[in-house]
Amino acid sequence: MMHYARYVLILIVLVIVQKTLIPFISLVGVTPDVLLIFVVLIALREGQIAGTVFGFIVGFMIDIVSGDFLGLSALTKTIAGFTAGYFYNEMNPLQTLGTYTFFIVVAVAAIVHNIIHFAFLFQGLPVSITEVVFKFIIGSTVYTVFISLILFFYYNSQSKLIRT
Amino acid sequence: MTRFLNIIRVYREYAVLAILIAVSVALFPLNDNPQIKQLRAYTIAGLGILHEPVSLITETVALRAENERLRRANIQLADEVYQLRDARLENIRLRRMIQFQERAPYDLVPARVVGQSVDPLRKTVTLNVGSKHGVREHMPIITESGLVGRVIIVAANYSVGQVLFNRDFRASAKVERTRVDGIIQWDGSTGLHLNNVAKTLDVNEGDVVVTSEYSNVYPPGIYIGVVSRVDIIPGLLTKDIRIRPGVDFSRLEEVFVMLYTADEEKLAIEEHIEQR
């Protein structure tokens, strides 16, 4: 139970980081979603249900803090957590995190998340679909996957230590 | 009921997903809810407090970069201002020179001072005109402000001029008002002397001094300067006359070489008399 409390603490820190520091590393208006990486991490470590629930909590917190459309992030992060949970390895939860599968999981979760998120967000707005697809859906996904390299290297080195 | 619970247990992931999606969707209409607004206000205020120290760091970094950028821009702009000012002053100088050139009685070759000697007692200037431009030795160098000196060495494309501030410089001169003659010589500082003027002759401060027709190098009437001081020194037969030159030698950039050579017949006869 303690590790869930730790997740909540990390979550609060990450929400602050996402809202304060991450905008400074934006590229042409595209920012990485560290909270989505966190949701994927929970789903791969704790399972699909935990991932789904944490996805909702993370999304709800974002909704409250950002002042955006209430419920949208909760919905998209819930689905992202659920999607990532499919890759949960019950026998060895940490195995996926140290391999290239982690990137695939982050990418799949991010694509699903971004499609729903930006489809809702730009619905009815005079924005070109090409821009939404390439800049926001693919751009944000690529950037998020790139940032997830930090976690990948961390877990990769951990698994090497365990093997030796 | 048991069967329903079993189904839920088997598909609990989907059940959780369905419930949370339903809750999320149920949140959609609550955007304008006063409680939600209040909650958002508190969290945004709290985040703002946290954001402030973070933004101080990032703003400091950004300010440093902006400061650097502004300093670069400032240097570029200062350089542009300097160049524009320089161009404006050059424009004024060239306009004066053109006007001067048009009214000068002799042909003038415009030249730029491309070098200056460092010898403090024998100051010379290097000009970017030479024999290809018609320049010959002993030709006068002038500006619109007056006499600068004379050409002493000529190459094809360059020439060297001896200026008034040179210990070897001498020129026959006269006071324009009273036609009193004398010899112009550098005073070793930033002025000139008019030598060989008897105490009894009429020379006052403010009198204009020009080249004399007795000169073998300069045509008569070239402005040299103004009498700045006249002293009578006891025991001397001549006056101590100081001249303030018209040309500012510290800012000599563009000059003219006057295509003037003394009458050769006159020179020949004078040489003949000297030899006898």
Image (cartoon, coloured by chain):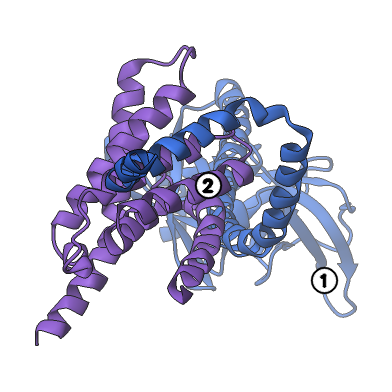
Can you tell which chain is drawn purple? A
Q: Nearer the viewer, residue B36 or B88?
A: B36
Mark 2 vs mark 1: which is more N-terminal? 2
- List x then y, in percent, for residue A38: 38, 57
CA neighbours of label 2 inside 10 A, class few (<14), some (14 to 19), many (20+): few
What residue lies at 27% left-to-right and 51% top-to-bottom? A85
**B131 displayed left or right of A11:** left
Circle 2: element type: helix
**In the image, which disc is placed on residue B262?**
none
Question: In the rendered structure, the residue with mark 1 lies on which chain?
Answer: B
The amino acid sitting under disc 2 is Gln
Of discs 2 and 1, which sits in the foreground? 2
What residue lies at 18% left-to-right and 71% top-to-bottom? A156
Circle 1: element type: loop
Q: Nearer the viewer, residue B134 or A164?
A: A164
**In the image, which disc is placed on residue B237?**
1
**A87 displayed left or right of A39:** left
- List x then y, in percent, for residue A13: 53, 64
Q: Is residue A69 visible from the viewing direction of this image?
A: no
Q: Nearer the viewer, residue B67 or B90?
A: B67
The residue identified by callout 2 is: B76
The amino acid sitting under disc 1 is Leu
What residue lies at 47% left-to-right and 76% top-to-bottom? A2
Q: Is residue B87 visible from the viewing direction of this image?
A: yes
**Quadrant in which the N terminus of chain B is drawn:** top left
Q: How many marks do you count on the picture? A: 2
Can you tell which chain is drawn blue? B
- List x then y, in percent, for residue B182: 70, 56
